[in-house]
Amino acid sequence: MIASPLLPHLTGSWGGTSRPASDARTFDVVDPATGAVLARLPEYGAAAATQAVDAAVAALDAEPDAPTRRRWLLGHAEQLVAERDELARIITAENGKPLAEARGEVEYAAGFYREAARQLDRLEVFEPPERPRSLRWQIHHRRAGVAALITPWNFPVAMLAKKLAGALAAGCPAVVKPSELTPLSAIAVFTLLERLDLPPGMVNLVFGRAAEIGAVLCARPEVRVLSFTGSTGVGRLLAAQCAPTLKRLSLELGGNAPFVVFEDADLDRAADALMANKFRCAGQTCVCSNRVLVHQDVHDAFVARVAERVGALQVGPGDRPGVQIGPLIDRRGWAKVRDHVADAVAGGARVVVGGGPALAAVAVHGGQAEGASCFYPPTVLVDVRAGMRCQVEETFGPIVAVRRFADEAEAIRLANDTEYGLAAYLFSGDPARLQGVAARLHFGHVGLNTAAGPTPELPFGGMEQSGLGREGGLEGLLEFIELQTCPIGDE
Ligand code: ADP
């Protein structure tokens, strides 16, 4: 069991109070590196979600002014930085990622609160100098109302930050539903939030039976914003459930990122960028490259560079010094990666590094029997083809799947050959080519000679089946804002 000063009570909370379960149902949170049970939590359902929404609705009576909201945002950013190491320990315990990555996640999360505080001035009333219809006009930024925030397990603190920073900046009371795989990080964040002077019901936390809780959050008309990060399938379901009450939807869904290396690229730079991008959280992020497309003239040279780097990666429990790749989140995630590799190999792909044979050796890292381990060896596959599962679906694991292309037109066609549209990366020595190709890609985030991911200062989000709306920057706040236009007659 995990013990931490940031986990004084292992419960959800709403209306400013920690809430024991109303029935005996519980679920376990498991360390994916060891299989050990970290905590047993109440499994809340529809009744708890209803109470949490009621608490948030009651909090609408408090109308915090902008200076108060700025103080909360900056105060929470400071708390996160001050408790960075303890939060990182909790993230690593339940998610598995290496401690250094977990610390980086907490710093990244703090940035969203700071940025939201910085953007608050932009929410002031706007009065255009023109006087259309001979009237004075004002545009007010009104808070949308209660916000429901449903977050995933891969960045349990940062994904919450992306949403909660916008909601708090706008003044929207929030009901948070973290992933049941990583609820401890959310409980720890709430322990910190409780030390601020938030009105009761301003932030509320429930977890347990996700579908039941989700159904309540979608059905309640007072919930005006649903902000969700997770799979496209669940995103579509939530959107459908929200249709009768026409909520604002902010959906950050799946990706299938192409990483394109043209023949004029700096291959070392591209290989380094791929390593930094592909292996974050053991390959379990929605901006991780899923399809590596390499010009045929530089294919072998690029693969050799990547194989050398991948072969040197240290795999093991995230709290062990020097470890770069932790376990996958659970056996379901592990089995998906295994199946994608098997499917590719059966279809003619070749394993250059990793794959099946190294599995037994890696499995002992967690001290678990091979059949229970969540560790998967970093793997490079070549001769991957269209239609293989690892090209159609997001693998969400440490697999570099490489395909060749012959010319720019083919690279664009292959890159766009997905229903998703989150992130893409292009590498070339020709800046005009990079701009030209980016303009033809239907992805919301396109790295040009970099595989940098999102940053708190700027909007990030997907096109097509990767979602709706943006997080970060001013746009991240506007997801929680309704514009109210006031023409003003004789005063
Ligand atoms: P993943 O497969 O990466 O876990 P999911 O989309 O299943 O992604 O999960 C993301 C978040 O959505 C988690 O908090 C999960 O509990 C939640 N979730 C899953 N199914 C539902 C649902 N039917 N209604 C509401 N939330 C859900």
Image (tube, rainbow, N blue to C red):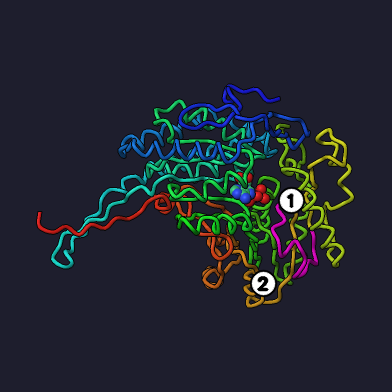
- Front residue of 263 and 456: 456
Q: Which residue is mark 2?
A: 414
- 308 within the magenta span: no
Residue 410 in the image, given as x and y percentages of width and height? 66, 76
Measuring from the top left, give residue 227's x and y in whole percent. 50, 50
Q: What range of the chain is rendered magenta?
A: 381-396
- Count of numbered badges drawn on the protein: 2
Give the Cα distance between marks 2 and 1.
Answer: 21 Å
Nearer to the camera, 371 or 80? 371
Would residue 99 be found to the left or right of residue 339 on screen? Answer: left
Three-letter code, disc 1: Pro
Q: Is residue 107 above or below residue 487?
A: above
The residue that appears at 76% across and 30% down in the rendered structure is 36
Examine the rendering and report whether any part of residue 108 can be seen: no
Q: Residue at x 71, y 25 (%)?
A: 1
Give the vertical position of 212 relative to 426 (above or below). Answer: above
Residue 233, image x, y percentages: 64, 58
User: Can you tell which quarter of the image residue 26 is in?
Assistant: top right
